[in-house]
Amino acid sequence: MKFIINRDQLLAPLQQIVSVIEKRQTMAILSNVLLHVDEGQLTMTGSDTEIQIVSKLNLESASDAGEITVPARKFLDICRLLPASAEIKFELHEGKVKLVSGRSRFSLSTLPAEHYPEFNESEFEHQFLLNAGKFKKGLDKTLFCMANQDVRYYLNGLLLHISNSRLKLVASDGHRLSIFEDDIGQPTGHEARIILPRKAVQELSRLLDDADTELNIQFSNNHIRIYYKDVVFSSKLIDAKFPDFSKVFNQSFMTPLLIRKQLLRDALTRVAILSNEKYKGVTFDIGGDLLKLSTHNPEHDEAEEELIIDYQGQALSISFNSQYMLDAVSNLDSELAVITIASNASSCFIEEPEDPLFKFIVMPMRM
């Protein structure tokens, strides 16, 4: 096995692959990247058995076919620290990989490619095309709401709901919920709900760096596979049913409150400095054309700030986790934020004033 490749061509796909490889592995070979050379093409594979990334690169010079696995992070560090545009000569010799670039020489230990675990995927029943920029925007607007190691394991991921030509992404940790909804661009003929695991969502958000590319998304009940440029991303799905959140829309609401997004964000950031470190609670006192934000903590520190708002409804006082509110407001694209509180004060909606693709719901807290 032998090939020559430019360091710049190798670096970005190798970084994508290494990002899915866990630092601590139950199997030593999963710390390695699988390299396969055939017919002038280098295929690199990395996996943690739950997620797999396969990247294909065309080799411009002559190569000898073969396959082997090498330590992924060491291989990446060598490539990263070599000069830009450096040529790397890669050769497998007597169970060791020799890397030569300029005056640098490296020798890496290997493990046989036949021991690399197969990523067994089920038959893909559905597929559709989707703009990468649209999908990434939806992921970024919702992923921060996913739970982390919650016993309700279906919350440790993100719901992907396909309803013919509509795409809906939903994430919740039980205290807040974000929804992104947009048009796919063409009818898919599918009605499906699948849950992507937390790590898969984060890796996809990192991977999709070209907004103009078209994705080919294939999925079954157990797996999803996404074709993006020269990369094939595969992941197992969470085998569960996402809770029905539609009931939160079927209730009466108070008069919406309009406020400048940046004013609210800055005020919340300042007031939250003196909130309880554990609960981060901030009280919203709404009445007339004023919103008063206030908080206190066990050390008896207090903060208070008043903002001018556009509101014609009844006066009320309600408390929220300041970080949850900041996350929501920061993800709005418009200058104005629309805040609508349920009549029974059980939930609060934050969205944009016109044609909102993104909705955020946060539950109040007791102070």
Image (cartoon, rainbow, N blue to C red):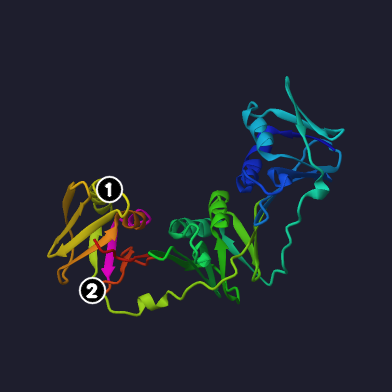
Where does the magenta region start and end? 329-341
**Please, what is the three-letter code of the amino acid marked with disc 2?**
Met
Residue annotated with mark 1: 269
In the foreground, 8 or 82: 82
Question: Considering the numbered disc 2 on the image, is that residue within a helix, a strand or a loop?
Answer: loop
Residue 197, percent from left and from top: 56, 60
**Rendered residue at 21%/60% (across/down):** 284
**Relative to 266, is 171 above or below?**
below
* Residue 9 appears left or right of 365: right
Return the x and y of residue 225 as percentages of the image width and height: 66, 61
Q: Position of residue 335 (x, y in %)?
A: 30, 55
Judged from this view, the residue extending furthest toward the front is 298
Asked whether, in this view, residue 272 is left or right of residue 72, the answer is left
Q: Which mark is residue 254?
A: 2
Residue 299 appears at what percent x and percent y?
21, 46
Q: Residue at x 58, y 56 (%)?
A: 200
Of tags 1 and 2, the one toward the viewer is 1
As measured in the structure, the alpha-carbon distance from the residue carrying label 1 to the one carrying label 2 is 26 Å
Q: Give me the residue at 33% from left, 56% from top.
A: 329
Identify which amino acid the numbered label 1 is placed on. Thr
In the rendered image, the quadrant that contains the N terminus is top right
330 in the magenta segment: yes
Location of residue 271 with respect to 146 vertically, above or below: above
In the visual, does 129 lie left or right of 332?
A: right
Residue 186 appears in the picture as rendered = yes
Chain-order first, disc 1 or disc 2: 2
Based on the picture, tell me whether residue 272 belongs to the magenta stretch: no
Q: Where, by quadrant of the figure, is residue 98 drawn?
A: top right
Label 1: which secondary element: helix
